Amino acid sequence: MSLKRRDFLLSGGAAAAFTVSQLTSSDSASAQALRPPAKWQHTADVVVIGSGATGLPAAIVAREAGASVILVEAEKDIGGHAITSGGNVPLGGGTSVQRKYGIKDSPDLLFRDLTDWSVVEPNGFPDYRYNDREIIRAFADSSAATFEWLLAHGVIFVDKAPDDFGGTSVGNSVPREMHSAAMDWPMVQTGKPADAMIRKMLSSGNGLMRPLEAAAKKGGVRILLEHRMTAIYRESPTSGRVIGIAVDNKGKKLDIRARKSVIIATGGSTGNVNFRRMFDPRLTEEYCGLAGMPWSNQNASGELSGLAIGAALWGLYNQTGEFGSNLTKPGTIGCQYNYVNLKWIPGSPVFDRARASGLSVANWQDLIMVNMLGQRFYDETGGQFTANDYHSIKDYVQGSYLNAKNRKYNPNNFINAALAGIGDGRNGGGPIWAIFDADAIIREKWDPHAPNVDIKAGFFFSADTLGDLAEAIQMQYQRVPMPRANLERTVARYNSFVDSGVDEDFGKPKPLHKIEKPPFYAAWATPVVHDTRAGLRINAKCQVVDWTGNVIPGLYCGGESAGGFSQHGLARAVCQGYIAGTNAAGTATQRGNAG
Ligand SMILES: Cc1cc2nc3c(=O)[nH]c(=O)nc-3n(C[C@H](O)[C@H](O)[C@H](O)COP(=O)(O)OP(=O)(O)OC[C@H]3O[C@@H](n4cnc5c(N)ncnc54)[C@H](O)[C@@H]3O)c2cc1C
C-alpha cells in the first residue's frame, strides 16, 4: 500500500470546505465533503452502513420501529468481524440469564464497573478511566434489554451460566459473558457447519450474525451487498441534515437517499495504516494481518466520511492499544492472517483471499523469533498485553486504589519488543520470523506446505542451511536483507543456551530444543492488529457530534467506529446498534447540543 500525501484544509464559514485527502488505501471512503446529487437511485427512511455487530441490529430495530431500511455492505456477505468472532457476548446489567443463575447485576453496577478509575492492566494501562460517562451510562442502561432483544431475534446462547471467558474489558464485579452457539450455520472459517456434537456448545460469531441476518430479511430490511459507502451527504457539504450516502457497487457509483437518518456501522479503523498511525506511529504497513480479515476490513471509511462532513473524533486515549487484544501475538505462523482465534481452512468462502491456514503453535519452545536482521528480541514463550475482566483482579473492590496496588507488572511483552524494530531510526518493527528446523516440524506435527503455509506470497521460506534461509527471506515488508551471518550467529547462540539450560539474553525458561536439523524454516510471525477503541464522537443516543459539540442531524454511529468506550468487541457494538436503530427511526428533525 503506498503512502499518499495528506492535505488537511479547513476554511471558515458555514459552508466550510473540509478536505482530508486520501489517508488510506484505494477502497476507502472519499474524505471530502460532497455536494448532494440531483438524483437518487434508491431511497429509504434509514440507511445503515455495514452489516456487522452494530449494523444488523440497528437495521432491524429501525425497521421494526416502522422505518424503511436499506443496509449497505461493502463485502460479498454480511457479518463483518462479528461473524468471524468467537461469539462471546458480554451484555449484563441484569439479564434474564444472570437472574436465572443468581448473579446480581444492575445497570448501576455495570456503569460503575466500566468507569472504575482504579482498574489497571498489569502494565499499568487503565481500561476504564477514560470512558465517556454519558456513553457508558447509555450502554449500562440498555445492555440487558439488548440481550433480551437478541434472544427474541433468534440468537441462541450456549445453555450455561454467564462466565468470564472471551470478550474483555467487561467489568470486574460479576460474570457477564454469554456465548452465541454456532448451531447449524456454516462456519465462515470452513464453509461447513460445526461438528454436530458441539454445535450447541461452540461459541461462534456465526450463531450471532446469521440469525440476525435472517431476522433482517424476514422483517423487510433491504440488504445491498457489495455496496461500499464512499461518502455521506449533508444538505450542503458541511452543514444541515444528513440526507444520504454515495456508494460504489462494483465500480458503479450510486446515491442512496436517507429520509430520516444514516447510521455508520463500518467497524473501525485499524486496517487503515495512516489512520491507525495517528494513535501509534509504530503501526506501519507490515502489520497486515488484521484480525477478521480477509472476511472484512476496518479501513476507517466511516470515520473519514464522518470527519469530512464535520464530525469529531472522541476518546482517543483509548486507542493507544497497549492493553487487551488490540495488538496480539500471532496464533498461527506462516500466513498473513494469523490472529489466534481465527484459522482459515480450505472451503471457507474467503480462502482464495486468505491463501493459507497457517501452522498453529502448540509449544513456543519449538522455535525462536527473530527480527528483520535475524536477531532474537524476546522470550518466545512469553505473553502479550493482558486484559481486564471478571476475576482478573482478585479481591476486587470497586474504586479502591488497592486494585492497582495488587497488580503484578509483567515486562515480558512480545508486542513492544517486536515493534521496537532494528534500531535504524525508522518506525515499525518490520516482519518477525519464527525460525525452526525439521525436528520442530515432527514435534509439532506440522505439514509445511500449501495450503497450510503461504509460500507464494512470501510468508513462508525454507532452505537447507541457515545462511541460505536468511538470504531467501525476501518479500515486500522485509525492507533490509537479513544478513546470513546474523541468523547463523543467533541460532548458534540459542543452541548454546539449550546446552547450558539458561537463556542469557531473554530468560526463556530452560530452552529445550536446538535448531540444527535441515531443512530450516522461516514463518511469518508478525504481531496482529485487532480492535479499534476510538472513533467518531457520539452521545447517549448514538447521534454523531461535530467539532463544536453539536449533534449532526440525521447521523448516528456505533461499534468500533464510535469513540468514548474502551471495551473489546461485540457487546458495545450490538448495544449501540440497538440504541442507534431505536433513535434513528424516529428522529427526522432532532437537533441539539451534546452533553
Ligand atoms: C477473530 C475475531 C474474534 C473476535 N471475538 C470476539 C468475541 O468473542 N467477543 C467479542 O466481544 N468481540 C469479539 N471480536 C470483536 C468483535 O467481532 C468486533 O468488535 C465487532 O464485530 C465490531 O462490530 P462493528 O459493527 O463495529 O464492526 P464489524 O462487525 O466488523 O462490522 C462492520 C461492517 O461494515 C462493513 N463496512 C466497512 N466499511 C464499509 C463501507 N465503506 N461501506 C459498506 N460497508 C462497510 C464491513 O465490511 C463489515 O461488514 C472478535 C473479532 C475478531 C476479528
Image (tube, rainbow, N blue to C red):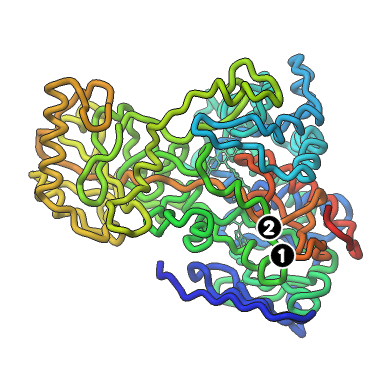
What amino acid type is highlighted by mark number 2? Leu
Could you tell me which residue is drawn at 62 percent across and 30 percent down? 119
Where is residue 234 shown, x and y percent of the image?
77, 74
Looking at marks 1 and 2 on the same chain, the residue that comes earlier in the sequence is marked by 1
Specify the quadrant that holds the N terminus. bottom left
Asked whether mark 2 and ligand 1 are closer than 8 Å, the reply comes as no
Circles 1, 2 touching at the beta carbon (< 8 Å): yes
Looking at the picture, tell me which residue is in the foreground, 543 or 583: 543
Q: Pointer 2: residues within 10 angstroms few (<14), some, or many (20+)? A: many
Circle number at residue 352: none
Could you tell me which residue is drawn at 20 percent across and 31 percent down? 440
Q: Is residue 304 above or below residue 325?
A: below
SS under mark 1: loop
Where is residue 511 shown, x and y percent of the image?
22, 24
State the image quarter where residue 85 is shown: top right
Q: Pointer 1: residues within 10 angstroms few (<14), some, or many (20+)? A: many
Where is residue 332 shown, x and y percent of the image?
36, 39
Q: Is residue 130 left or right of residue 469?
A: right
Looking at the picture, tell me which residue is in the foreground, 70 or 594: 594
Q: Is residue 348 above or below residue 379?
A: below
Q: Is residue 468 left or right of residue 248?
A: left
State the image quarter where residue 230 is shown: bottom right
SS under mark 2: strand
Could you tell me which residue is drawn at 10 percent across and 35 percent down? 492
From this viewpoint, is residue 222 visible? no
**Residue at which label 1 appears:** 311
From this viewpoint, is residue 419 visible? yes
**Residue at which label 2 appears:** 536
What amino acid type is highlighted by mark number 1? Ala
Could you tell me which residue is drawn at 18 percent across and 53 percent down? 482
Where is residue 102 shown, x and y percent of the image?
76, 14
Asked whether mark 1 and ligand 1 are closer than 8 Å, the reply comes as no
